[in-house]
Structures are given as C-alpha cells and as structure tokens.
Image (spheres, rainbow, N blue to C red):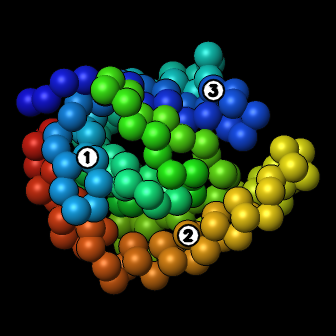
Amino acid sequence: MGRDVRVVYRKFDESLHWHQWLEWLGEDEYGVWLGGRVGAVSQRGEGLKLTAKEAHVQLFPRDQWFTAIFNDAPRMTEIYCDITTPVEFFEDRVTMIDLDLDVIKRRDGTVLVDDEDEFAEHQVKYNYPPEIITQAQASCDWLVQAVVNDEPFTTVYKTYLDMVR
C-alpha cells in the first residue's frame, strides 16, 4: 500500500496525547485516509499501548475541526470522531490538538457525545480562547447529525476499510 505516516494527537498545552503509525491509503474530497490493520499499535502519551483487534481507517479532513476513526466489525464503536483543531499535514506525519469532545456512533446506530465534562474542565485548565470553544462545539453539533446522514460516514469509508482488512 502506501507509506507509513505518524499520527500525533496533542492536548492544548502541547503535551502528547495519543500517537501511532498508520498506512497512507489515499486522499479524496473528504481528506486524507490512513489505515491500521489488525495488530496496529496506538499509544497514549508515553504510557498505555493498545493493539487493534479489528482493522480501522482514520480520516484527517483538511480545514475541519475533527478527525474520524472507522472501525471494522465486530467492534461495538463503528465511528469515533475526535473534535480537534484543524489537522496540520507534514510529509511523514499529521498532528492536531484534541479538544476533548468526541462523537461516537455505535454499530447499533446509537449516537452519543462523550467527554463533555472534560471539555468544560479543560476550558478552564487550559484557558481555551472563546473561538476555540465555539468552533469545537459547532463541529460536535454538526457531527451528531452527519455520522448518521452524510458522507463519508455512511458508505465512502468502507472503500478504505476494505484496503486494510
């Protein structure tokens, strides 16, 4: 397939949050697609390492305030969107700031927003500027509907997921 790309999620104070290496799958009108096969490892900061039991792909949109993970069955979480600052793209890595809020679509169709308490706490702890708060909330609100009704959340991602199965 493609080259390996390092994915780096940071917190607002620039501390390392999650990181991993994924495989370049391509780019389309929705953004850059990277994939992880069964056994791919992601790490939280310098601590917890997780090994993927299912294949997954990640979407890194250009000029949007989110990233998205699409998990293969039977994982209960079908789509997991992190609210982030717009992604910064480099030759061998992508990086962004995780803004706490997550939109999750379960395989049974249930959609929920997670970590609203962390978002509220970090607004104070990290002194998020008002425009960051507004953009993060707007992206979250949009994603709650989009993960059910809009592309690339309904069918487009399946083409990329097929590449890493």
Q: Residue 139's mark?
A: 2
Q: Is the residue marked by circle 1 packed among few (<14), some (14-19), or many (20+) residues within 10 Å?
A: many
Out of 20 and 41, give the one closest to the viewer. Answer: 20
Quadrant position of the C terminus in the picture? top left
Q: Amino acid at mark 2?
A: Ser
Farthest residue, direction top: 46
Q: Residue at x 53, y 41 (%)?
A: 96
The residue identified by callout 3 is 16
Quadrant position of the N terminus in the picture? top left
Q: Amino acid at mark 3?
A: Leu
Q: Position of residue 17 (x, y in %)?
A: 62, 32
Q: Position of residue 52 (x, y in %)?
A: 35, 33
Please tell me in which quadrant of the rendered image residue 20 appears: top left
Q: Is the residue marked by circle 2 packed among few (<14), some (14-19), or many (20+) residues within 10 Å?
A: some
Q: Give the CA separation, mark 1 to mark 3.
A: 22 Å
Secondary structure at numbered mark 2: helix
Q: How many marks?
A: 3
Q: Position of residue 22 (x, y in %)?
A: 30, 30
- Specify whether 29 is left or right of 78: left
Out of 147 and 94, give the one closest to the viewer. Answer: 94
Up the image or down, 161 lies above or below 22; here it is below
Viewer can see residue 127: yes
Q: Amino acid at mark 1?
A: Trp
Q: Give the CA separation, mark 2 to mark 1.
A: 19 Å
Q: Residue at x 55, y 36 (%)?
A: 9
Q: Residue at x 57, y 51 (%)?
A: 85
The residue identified by callout 1 is 33
